[in-house]
Image (spheres, rainbow, N blue to C red):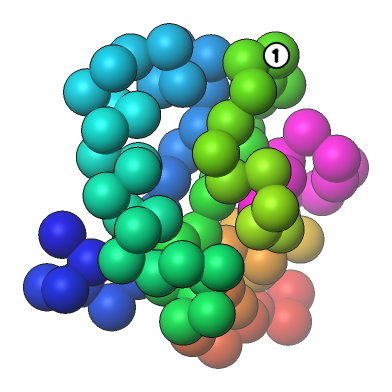
Amino acid sequence: MLRRCSKLVVILSDEFLKNPDSQWSLNVGVSLDPGSKGKKIIPVIYKKITEPNLLAGINPCNRTRVLEDSWFWNSVIRSLGGVQDNK
């Protein structure tokens, strides 16, 4: 998965974190980029989550903590290595 991709965007939700298949995929992704040194995994929190998650040590793009959509989406774009919109 991460060997073929330069980035992996993971949209975290309680449903995702409860799903064994999703957890397996996430574990594989984390094992291919231990400690997130390559910054290949980009966790995105779009809604508040209550389930514990494996990516707790990686700074997410967290929509629940920002007031403006433009700031959130620019954060996601920067994480992907893109250029942010200055609007």
Q: The disc labelled 1 sits on which kind of residue?
A: Thr
Tell whether 34 sits left or right of 44: left
The residue tagged 1 is 50
Image-quadrant location for residue 29: bottom left
Considering only vertical position in the picture, is 43 above or below 54?
A: below
Could you tell me residue 45's position as x and y percent? 62, 37
For the C terminus, the image quarter is: bottom right
Q: Tell me if I can see residue 41 in this picture.
A: yes
Q: Residues within 10 Å of mark 1 (few under 14, many from 20)?
A: few
20 left or right of 35 in image: left
x 58%, y 46%: residue: 55
Q: Residue at position x 58%, y 31% from top?
A: 53
Relative to 71, is 64 above or below?
above
Q: Residue at x 46, y 82 (%)?
A: 38
* Residue 71 position in % (x across, y down): 76, 61
Question: Looking at the image, which is closer to me, 25 or 47?
Answer: 25
Residue 39 lies left or right of residue 27; in this view the side is right
Check residue 33 for magenta coloring: no
- Report the span colored magenta: 60-70
Number of numbered labels in the structure image: 1
